[in-house]
Image (spheres, rainbow, N blue to C red):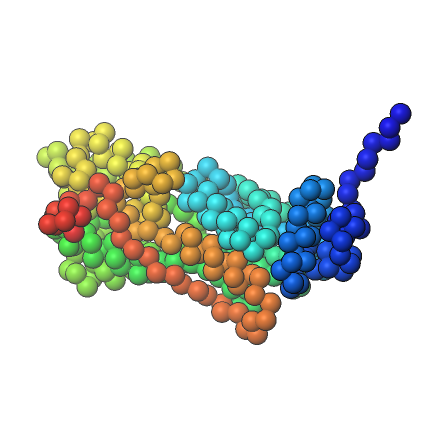
Protein backbone atom coordinates (compact mmCIF):
# COMPACT_ATOMS: atom_id res chain seq x y z
CA UNK A 1 0.00 0.00 0.00
CA UNK A 2 1.41 3.36 -1.05
CA UNK A 3 2.24 5.68 1.81
CA UNK A 4 0.35 8.97 1.63
CA UNK A 5 2.79 11.79 0.97
CA UNK A 6 3.14 14.48 3.63
CA UNK A 7 2.92 18.21 3.00
CA UNK A 8 5.98 19.66 1.24
CA UNK A 9 8.56 21.41 3.39
CA UNK A 10 10.94 24.30 2.77
CA UNK A 11 13.69 21.72 2.18
CA UNK A 12 11.60 20.16 -0.59
CA UNK A 13 11.22 23.60 -2.21
CA UNK A 14 15.00 24.17 -2.01
CA UNK A 15 15.65 20.77 -3.60
CA UNK A 16 13.13 21.37 -6.38
CA UNK A 17 14.47 24.87 -7.10
CA UNK A 18 18.11 23.81 -6.85
CA UNK A 19 18.96 26.56 -4.37
CA UNK A 20 20.11 26.78 -0.77
CA UNK A 21 17.57 26.54 2.05
CA UNK A 22 18.47 30.10 3.11
CA UNK A 23 17.47 31.40 -0.34
CA UNK A 24 14.00 29.87 0.03
CA UNK A 25 13.71 31.42 3.49
CA UNK A 26 14.56 34.85 2.09
CA UNK A 27 11.96 34.59 -0.66
CA UNK A 28 9.25 33.40 1.74
CA UNK A 29 10.01 36.24 4.16
CA UNK A 30 10.16 38.92 1.46
CA UNK A 31 13.91 39.55 1.73
CA UNK A 32 15.95 40.57 -1.35
CA UNK A 33 17.48 37.86 -3.57
CA UNK A 34 18.47 37.76 -7.22
CA UNK A 35 15.56 37.77 -9.68
CA UNK A 36 16.52 34.42 -11.20
CA UNK A 37 16.70 32.77 -7.77
CA UNK A 38 13.35 34.31 -6.74
CA UNK A 39 11.69 33.01 -9.91
CA UNK A 40 13.04 29.49 -9.40
CA UNK A 41 11.82 29.44 -5.79
CA UNK A 42 8.39 30.80 -6.71
CA UNK A 43 8.05 28.22 -9.49
CA UNK A 44 8.97 25.44 -7.07
CA UNK A 45 6.49 26.71 -4.46
CA UNK A 46 3.75 26.71 -7.07
CA UNK A 47 4.65 23.27 -8.43
CA UNK A 48 4.78 21.66 -4.97
CA UNK A 49 1.84 23.66 -3.63
CA UNK A 50 3.98 24.62 -0.63
CA UNK A 51 1.99 26.46 2.08
CA UNK A 52 3.79 29.01 4.25
CA UNK A 53 3.21 28.42 7.97
CA UNK A 54 2.38 32.00 8.93
CA UNK A 55 1.78 31.00 12.56
CA UNK A 56 5.31 29.61 12.86
CA UNK A 57 6.63 32.69 11.10
CA UNK A 58 4.87 34.84 13.64
CA UNK A 59 6.31 32.95 16.60
CA UNK A 60 9.81 33.33 15.18
CA UNK A 61 9.33 37.07 14.65
CA UNK A 62 7.47 37.57 17.98
CA UNK A 63 4.46 38.68 15.92
CA UNK A 64 1.13 37.09 15.09
CA UNK A 65 0.32 39.53 12.25
CA UNK A 66 -3.15 39.79 13.76
CA UNK A 67 -4.97 42.94 14.91
CA UNK A 68 -8.22 42.92 16.91
CA UNK A 69 -11.00 45.34 15.98
CA UNK A 70 -13.61 46.14 18.63
CA UNK A 71 -16.82 47.70 17.32
CA UNK A 72 -20.38 47.72 18.72
CA UNK A 73 -21.89 45.69 15.85
CA UNK A 74 -21.96 45.17 12.10
CA UNK A 75 -25.69 45.86 11.81
CA UNK A 76 -25.23 49.63 11.73
CA UNK A 77 -23.94 50.57 8.27
CA UNK A 78 -21.30 52.98 9.57
CA UNK A 79 -19.71 50.34 11.80
CA UNK A 80 -19.89 47.76 9.00
CA UNK A 81 -18.15 50.16 6.61
CA UNK A 82 -15.48 50.88 9.22
CA UNK A 83 -14.80 47.14 9.66
CA UNK A 84 -14.59 46.67 5.89
CA UNK A 85 -12.06 49.46 5.36
CA UNK A 86 -9.93 48.55 8.39
CA UNK A 87 -9.76 44.96 7.13
CA UNK A 88 -8.63 46.25 3.71
CA UNK A 89 -5.97 48.48 5.27
CA UNK A 90 -4.65 45.55 7.33
CA UNK A 91 -4.62 43.17 4.37
CA UNK A 92 -2.42 45.63 2.47
CA UNK A 93 0.08 45.24 5.31
CA UNK A 94 -0.37 41.43 5.27
CA UNK A 95 -2.14 41.48 8.64
CA UNK A 96 -5.30 39.60 9.58
CA UNK A 97 -8.23 41.16 11.44
CA UNK A 98 -9.90 39.59 14.46
CA UNK A 99 -13.41 41.10 14.53
CA UNK A 100 -15.01 41.53 17.97
CA UNK A 101 -18.60 42.82 18.12
CA UNK A 102 -19.22 44.13 21.64
CA UNK A 103 -22.90 45.16 21.43
CA UNK A 104 -21.83 48.38 23.23
CA UNK A 105 -21.50 46.34 26.44
CA UNK A 106 -18.74 47.71 28.70
CA UNK A 107 -18.05 44.34 30.34
CA UNK A 108 -17.96 42.60 26.96
CA UNK A 109 -15.50 45.21 25.68
CA UNK A 110 -13.11 44.44 28.54
CA UNK A 111 -13.48 40.69 27.96
CA UNK A 112 -12.58 41.09 24.30
CA UNK A 113 -9.54 43.23 25.16
CA UNK A 114 -8.35 40.56 27.60
CA UNK A 115 -8.97 37.79 25.06
CA UNK A 116 -7.10 39.70 22.35
CA UNK A 117 -4.12 40.22 24.66
CA UNK A 118 -4.11 36.53 25.62
CA UNK A 119 -4.00 35.64 21.92
CA UNK A 120 -0.93 37.87 21.52
CA UNK A 121 -2.42 40.17 18.91
CA UNK A 122 -0.03 42.81 17.60
CA UNK A 123 -2.46 45.57 18.48
CA UNK A 124 -6.08 46.59 19.06
CA UNK A 125 -8.27 49.17 17.30
CA UNK A 126 -11.36 49.98 19.33
CA UNK A 127 -14.57 51.97 19.07
CA UNK A 128 -15.74 51.40 22.63
CA UNK A 129 -17.99 52.81 25.35
CA UNK A 130 -16.17 51.68 28.49
CA UNK A 131 -14.44 54.75 30.02
CA UNK A 132 -12.46 52.48 32.37
CA UNK A 133 -11.16 50.02 29.80
CA UNK A 134 -7.92 48.40 31.05
CA UNK A 135 -5.28 47.86 28.37
CA UNK A 136 -1.81 46.47 29.03
CA UNK A 137 0.92 49.04 28.41
CA UNK A 138 2.77 46.77 25.99
CA UNK A 139 -0.33 46.31 23.79
CA UNK A 140 -0.50 48.94 21.02
CA UNK A 141 -3.99 50.46 20.98
CA UNK A 142 -5.72 53.05 18.79
CA UNK A 143 -9.14 54.43 19.73
CA UNK A 144 -11.83 55.66 17.36
CA UNK A 145 -13.99 58.59 18.52
CA UNK A 146 -13.14 58.10 22.24
CA UNK A 147 -10.23 59.83 23.94
CA UNK A 148 -8.65 57.33 26.32
CA UNK A 149 -5.71 59.31 27.65
CA UNK A 150 -2.56 60.99 26.31
CA UNK A 151 -0.72 57.72 25.59
CA UNK A 152 -3.45 56.25 23.36
CA UNK A 153 -4.01 57.93 19.98
CA UNK A 154 -7.60 58.70 19.01
CA UNK A 155 -8.70 58.96 15.38
CA UNK A 156 -11.91 60.83 14.57
CA UNK A 157 -13.64 62.97 12.00
CA UNK A 158 -13.68 66.72 12.57
CA UNK A 159 -17.05 66.54 14.31
CA UNK A 160 -17.14 70.22 15.32
CA UNK A 161 -16.54 71.31 11.72
CA UNK A 162 -19.18 68.81 10.58
CA UNK A 163 -21.83 70.26 12.88
CA UNK A 164 -20.91 73.75 11.76
CA UNK A 165 -21.10 72.72 8.10
CA UNK A 166 -24.60 71.28 8.62
CA UNK A 167 -25.83 74.61 10.01
CA UNK A 168 -24.18 76.54 7.18
CA UNK A 169 -25.79 74.31 4.55
CA UNK A 170 -29.27 74.60 6.07
CA UNK A 171 -28.87 78.39 6.09
CA UNK A 172 -27.58 78.35 2.51
CA UNK A 173 -30.65 76.36 1.39
CA UNK A 174 -33.04 78.92 2.89
CA UNK A 175 -33.75 77.60 6.40
CA UNK A 176 -34.39 80.13 9.16
CA UNK A 177 -35.67 78.11 12.13
CA UNK A 178 -33.92 74.78 12.72
CA UNK A 179 -33.68 71.93 15.22
CA UNK A 180 -30.84 69.70 16.41
CA UNK A 181 -31.86 66.13 17.31
CA UNK A 182 -29.54 63.70 19.06
CA UNK A 183 -29.67 60.29 20.67
CA UNK A 184 -26.53 58.61 21.91
CA UNK A 185 -24.05 57.93 24.67
CA UNK A 186 -23.67 60.46 27.47
CA UNK A 187 -19.95 59.65 27.66
CA UNK A 188 -17.46 62.31 26.71
CA UNK A 189 -16.43 61.56 23.12
CA UNK A 190 -15.60 63.24 19.83
CA UNK A 191 -19.08 62.91 18.21
CA UNK A 192 -20.49 65.08 21.03
CA UNK A 193 -18.69 68.01 19.36
CA UNK A 194 -21.26 67.94 16.55
CA UNK A 195 -23.66 69.78 18.87
CA UNK A 196 -21.20 72.58 19.67
CA UNK A 197 -20.29 72.94 16.00
CA UNK A 198 -23.94 73.19 15.01
CA UNK A 199 -24.63 75.83 17.66
CA UNK A 200 -21.63 77.81 16.45
CA UNK A 201 -22.81 77.59 12.85
CA UNK A 202 -26.34 78.70 13.75
CA UNK A 203 -25.04 81.71 15.67
CA UNK A 204 -22.72 82.67 12.82
CA UNK A 205 -25.52 82.48 10.22
CA UNK A 206 -28.28 83.99 12.38
CA UNK A 207 -30.36 80.81 12.52
CA UNK A 208 -32.92 80.32 15.28
CA UNK A 209 -32.46 76.86 16.74
CA UNK A 210 -33.74 74.42 19.35
CA UNK A 211 -32.29 71.12 20.59
CA UNK A 212 -33.83 67.81 21.62
CA UNK A 213 -31.27 65.45 23.14
CA UNK A 214 -31.94 61.89 24.30
CA UNK A 215 -29.56 59.37 25.85
CA UNK A 216 -29.25 55.74 24.78
CA UNK A 217 -32.17 53.82 26.25
CA UNK A 218 -34.61 56.74 26.23
CA UNK A 219 -37.90 56.17 24.41
CA UNK A 220 -37.72 57.13 20.75
CA UNK A 221 -41.36 58.24 21.03
CA UNK A 222 -40.06 61.42 22.67
CA UNK A 223 -38.88 62.67 19.26
CA UNK A 224 -42.32 62.18 17.72
CA UNK A 225 -43.98 63.93 20.67
CA UNK A 226 -41.45 66.78 20.37
CA UNK A 227 -42.14 67.27 16.67
CA UNK A 228 -45.92 67.11 17.22
CA UNK A 229 -45.59 69.91 19.76
CA UNK A 230 -44.02 72.07 17.06
CA UNK A 231 -46.80 71.68 14.48
CA UNK A 232 -49.00 74.77 14.12
CA UNK A 233 -52.01 74.64 11.77
CA UNK A 234 -50.59 71.57 10.07
CA UNK A 235 -47.16 73.10 9.52
CA UNK A 236 -43.96 72.28 11.38
CA UNK A 237 -42.41 75.41 12.88
CA UNK A 238 -38.95 74.13 11.88
CA UNK A 239 -37.88 74.36 8.26
CA UNK A 240 -34.61 72.50 8.83
CA UNK A 241 -33.40 69.63 11.04
CA UNK A 242 -29.88 68.37 11.73
CA UNK A 243 -29.75 64.80 13.05
CA UNK A 244 -26.61 63.61 14.80
CA UNK A 245 -26.45 60.43 12.65
CA UNK A 246 -27.89 59.27 9.33
CA UNK A 247 -29.63 56.43 11.16
CA UNK A 248 -31.51 58.95 13.30
CA UNK A 249 -32.25 61.09 10.23
CA UNK A 250 -33.80 58.08 8.48
CA UNK A 251 -36.14 57.49 11.44
CA UNK A 252 -37.00 61.19 11.80
CA UNK A 253 -37.89 61.46 8.10
CA UNK A 254 -40.40 58.61 8.53
CA UNK A 255 -41.93 60.41 11.55
CA UNK A 256 -42.16 63.67 9.60
CA UNK A 257 -43.99 61.97 6.75
CA UNK A 258 -46.42 60.33 9.20
CA UNK A 259 -47.11 63.81 10.51
CA UNK A 260 -47.93 65.04 7.01
CA UNK A 261 -44.68 66.96 6.49
CA UNK A 262 -42.95 66.77 3.12
CA UNK A 263 -39.18 66.30 2.97
CA UNK A 264 -37.53 68.40 1.63
CA UNK A 265 -40.36 70.67 0.46
CA UNK A 266 -41.64 71.56 3.97
CA UNK A 267 -38.62 70.68 6.07
CA UNK A 268 -35.05 69.92 5.05
CA UNK A 269 -33.01 67.25 6.84
CA UNK A 270 -29.26 66.71 7.11
CA UNK A 271 -27.69 63.71 8.83
CA UNK A 272 -24.13 62.77 9.74
CA UNK A 273 -21.97 59.78 8.69
CA UNK A 274 -22.33 59.37 4.93
CA UNK A 275 -24.33 56.11 4.93
CA UNK A 276 -25.24 54.77 1.50
CA UNK A 277 -27.92 52.30 0.42
CA UNK A 278 -26.36 48.84 0.02
CA UNK A 279 -22.96 50.29 0.92
CA UNK A 280 -22.23 51.93 -2.43
CA UNK A 281 -25.46 53.33 -3.90
CA UNK A 282 -27.18 56.65 -3.15
CA UNK A 283 -26.85 58.39 0.21
CA UNK A 284 -29.66 57.63 2.69
CA UNK A 285 -30.13 61.38 3.20
CA UNK A 286 -28.28 64.63 2.67
CA UNK A 287 -25.38 64.20 5.03
CA UNK A 288 -22.04 65.19 6.47
CA UNK A 289 -19.74 62.44 5.21
CA UNK A 290 -17.12 60.88 7.46
CA UNK A 291 -13.95 59.82 5.56
CA UNK A 292 -14.22 56.16 6.61
CA UNK A 293 -11.44 54.89 4.35
CA UNK A 294 -9.02 57.55 5.63
CA UNK A 295 -10.02 56.85 9.25
CA UNK A 296 -9.23 53.17 8.70
CA UNK A 297 -5.87 53.86 7.05
CA UNK A 298 -4.86 56.28 9.81
CA UNK A 299 -5.79 53.80 12.56
CA UNK A 300 -3.69 51.07 10.96
CA UNK A 301 -0.79 53.45 10.29
CA UNK A 302 -0.68 54.66 13.91
CA UNK A 303 -1.07 51.14 15.29
CA UNK A 304 1.71 49.54 13.25
CA UNK A 305 4.16 52.48 13.19
CA UNK A 306 6.80 51.20 15.59
CA UNK A 307 9.42 53.93 15.15
CA UNK A 308 7.11 56.85 15.93
CA UNK A 309 8.57 58.39 19.14
CA UNK A 310 5.39 60.17 20.23
CA UNK A 311 2.01 59.29 18.76
CA UNK A 312 -0.52 62.16 18.52
CA UNK A 313 -3.29 62.03 21.15
CA UNK A 314 -5.92 63.09 18.59
CA UNK A 315 -6.06 63.01 14.79
CA UNK A 316 -9.05 64.83 13.25
CA UNK A 317 -9.83 64.10 9.61
CA UNK A 318 -11.89 66.45 7.40
CA UNK A 319 -15.56 65.86 6.62
CA UNK A 320 -17.59 66.91 3.56
CA UNK A 321 -21.21 67.59 2.69
CA UNK A 322 -23.08 65.32 0.22
CA UNK A 323 -26.55 65.72 -1.27
CA UNK A 324 -28.92 62.84 -0.56
CA UNK A 325 -32.38 64.04 -1.56
CA UNK A 326 -33.54 65.56 1.74
CA UNK A 327 -32.46 69.16 1.11
CA UNK A 328 -33.60 71.75 -1.43
CA UNK A 329 -30.67 72.72 -3.61
CA UNK A 330 -30.33 74.70 -6.79
CA UNK A 331 -29.41 72.85 -9.96
CA UNK A 332 -26.17 74.07 -11.53
CA UNK A 333 -25.37 74.15 -15.21
CA UNK A 334 -23.56 70.82 -15.18
CA UNK A 335 -26.43 69.07 -13.45
CA UNK A 336 -24.66 68.77 -10.09
CA UNK A 337 -26.30 69.88 -6.90
CA UNK A 338 -25.11 73.25 -5.69
Question: Is 224 above or below relative to 137?
Answer: above
Q: Position of residue 46 (x, y in %)?
A: 66, 44
Q: Is residue 191 left or right of residue 197?
A: right
Query: Residue extending furthest top?
Result: 1
Q: Residue at x 38, y 40 (%)?
A: 279
Q: Is residue 157 left or right of residue 327?
A: right
Question: Is 158 above or below relative to 334?
Answer: below
Question: Is 137 above or below relative to 83?
Answer: below
Q: Residue at x 53, y 53 (%)?
A: 92
Q: Residue 14 or 224: which is nearer the viewer?
A: 14
Query: Residue extending furthest right?
Result: 1
Q: Position of residue 25 (x, y in %)?
A: 73, 57
Q: Give the image quarter of residue 277.
A: top left
Q: Is residue 177 visible?
A: no
Q: Position of residue 183 (x, y in %)?
A: 37, 45
Question: In which quadrant will I find the N terminus?
Answer: top right
Q: How many marks?
A: 0
Q: Residue 287 or 149: which is nearer the viewer?
A: 287
Q: Residue at x 66, y 63 (%)?
A: 33
Q: Is residue 257 left or right of residue 95?
A: left
Q: Residue at x 23, y 60 (%)?
A: 201
Q: Give the image quarter of residue 136.
A: bottom right
Question: Is 199 above or below relative to 233?
Answer: below
Q: Residue 311 or 102: which is nearer the viewer?
A: 311
Q: Is residue 16 visible?
A: yes
Q: Position of residue 191 (x, y in %)?
A: 39, 55
Q: Residue 248 or 165: which is nearer the viewer?
A: 165
Amino acid sequence: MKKESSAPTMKDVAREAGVALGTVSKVVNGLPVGDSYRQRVEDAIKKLNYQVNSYAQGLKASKTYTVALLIPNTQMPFFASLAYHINLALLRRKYRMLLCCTDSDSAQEQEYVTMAQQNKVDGIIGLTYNPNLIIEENTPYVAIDRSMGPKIPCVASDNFAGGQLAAEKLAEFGCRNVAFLRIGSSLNNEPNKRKAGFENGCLARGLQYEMKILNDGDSFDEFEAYLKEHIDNGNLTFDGIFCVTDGLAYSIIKILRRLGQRVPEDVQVIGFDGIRYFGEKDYVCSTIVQPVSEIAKMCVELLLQENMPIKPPLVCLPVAYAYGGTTRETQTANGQKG
